[in-house]
Amino acid sequence: MLEDGRVLFDMRTARYSVSEQHGRCLLQLWSEERNVMRTVVEMQERAQCLRLTTRRMGAAKSQALELVPTSDRRTPTARESARKNYRRLLERALTRRFIGSKVDGLRSAMDLEHSFGPAYVRGRLFRGPAADAVIGVSASESGATVDGILTLGILWLDHCRQTTDGRRHFGGLKVVVPAGAWRTTAERMAWLNHEAADFQLFTLDERSEELEAVDFRDTGNLDSRLVHAFSAAAAIERCQVGVARLMELVPEAAKGRVEVRASSASEVGLHLHGLEFARARHGFAAKSFTREDELTFGAGANETPLTEESEGMCRELLARLFSSRQPDGVHTDPLYRLQPERWLEAELRAGIAELFPGLRQDLMYTQVPALSTGDRGLLDLLTLDRNGRLAVIELKADEDLHLPLQALDYWIRVRALNDDRQPGVGTGGGRALSAFERQGYFSGAEVSELAPRLLLAAPALRIHPANEPVLRYFSPQVEWELIALGEHWRRDLKVVFRKRSGDLRH
């Protein structure tokens, strides 16, 4: 689902609801990152696209949503032509900007061995014995592709340094992004190790062909916000009648495997190895001020209200779910494969005391929302160590080229919120409280002013080979640890090896 050409939802994982309300067609879309509700006023079927004219609640101006099979709707020929034109444009712009330097070998060919894709134009800039790696991306590429340029840029710089003949020294990296699309790259670049390389950021206006330098050290205030913490215990108590009703439908032998977790002050979910399969929402009954529990079961778009008519279906679904989703289940079963990262998260939370003895299991927050208004708005795990220092934990069950920099996004925002300190109520003007403490997180604990730790965990064979080279270029101020887990983590969670920032940094 696109809005203004940018991916709003990936419908393979997002949920949706279409309903009638007061004579209007109401469309609701939600995922782990965001929630959108719109009134649909018109629908047009086009080639490879379903265009929906929608209106936000209370807004007069309409907005278009597009449901497409892929975010890039250009034909292969048009896509290749646009990339060739951008390559020529970038060469002209670099030649004019860096007079006396030679632009060498700009290319965008696929190189799977080194993780280079065709969306990025990469090359070298020579000036005598000095050299810089150069990488650029066109405004015609997707927002996610533009935001991923720094990962590929670091890999390209590392590749240039490793393959140089010794006559030249690659001192730095010049990154070129479209005008107006620099913020994510700038925020990330500020936290790289600038003693290891001279990182520079530029924007390219493709109409005027002008390159403009961006001061990534001054990106202004981070676009971050933090919702107030709620009492999970109070939410579970509030929904206890509905939870008890749902538990009656769970097979007797499997009840000990169910995890009851609150997702908000008025909603509680039932989880099996990280997969939410039922939920109880406590709210007002229709056309009444009395409160009641709304019970539903199923995952994603298959969420179904629990009624007398659907109870049999619910029992059948739960029987199949508990039979399939177990550590020794069949790997090809969809219920076994569904949401592997949430399964990994559940295992990690349960075994945190043994895997990470220094972290506090009693003050751990899962899927912390609204740290950023960007495409990635949920942090996997956030907790404190025994000394009150924040620990940001990012998990991946499958290979992800961009894991280090995506995790860095969260670290940057958690650090900014921790540095945002003000006198709190009841402190008597003494110790200043971080934004987390003021919003009710980590009750009873004192959050340290030290910068957070960054922990990245994934199965050993699912750690992308490019992750370590990128981590080596992180700033010394980012204390990170890469944890490789055994491949059979569903059955037995073990650490295979750990690598820390002090061991790998340039």
Image (spheres, rainbow, N blue to C red):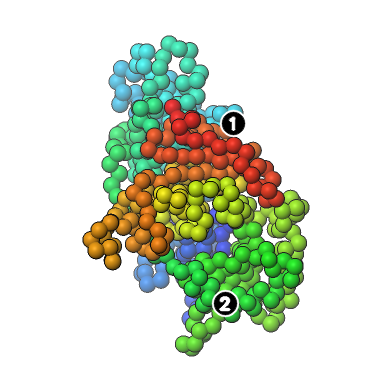
Residue 122 seen: no
**Residue at (59%, 28%) from the top-left corner?**
113
Q: Relative to 354, does residue 175 appear above or below in the rendering?
A: above
Q: Secondary structure at mark 2?
A: helix
Q: Amino acid at mark 2?
A: Gln
Q: Residues within 10 Å of mark 1 (few under 14, many from 20)?
A: few
Q: Amino acid at mark 1?
A: Leu
Question: Residue 463: percent from the left, percent from the top?
Answer: 59, 38
**Residue at (59%, 71%) from the top-left corner?**
279
The answer for how far apart the CA atoms under marks 1 and 2 are is 52 Å
Q: Give the numbered dot on residue 31.
A: none
Which residue corresponds to mark 1?
Answer: 112
Q: Residues within 10 Å of mark 2 (few under 14, many from 20)?
A: some
Question: Residue 168: percent from the left, percent from the top?
Answer: 41, 14
Which residue corresponds to mark 2?
Answer: 240
State which tag comes first along the sequence, 1 or 2: 1
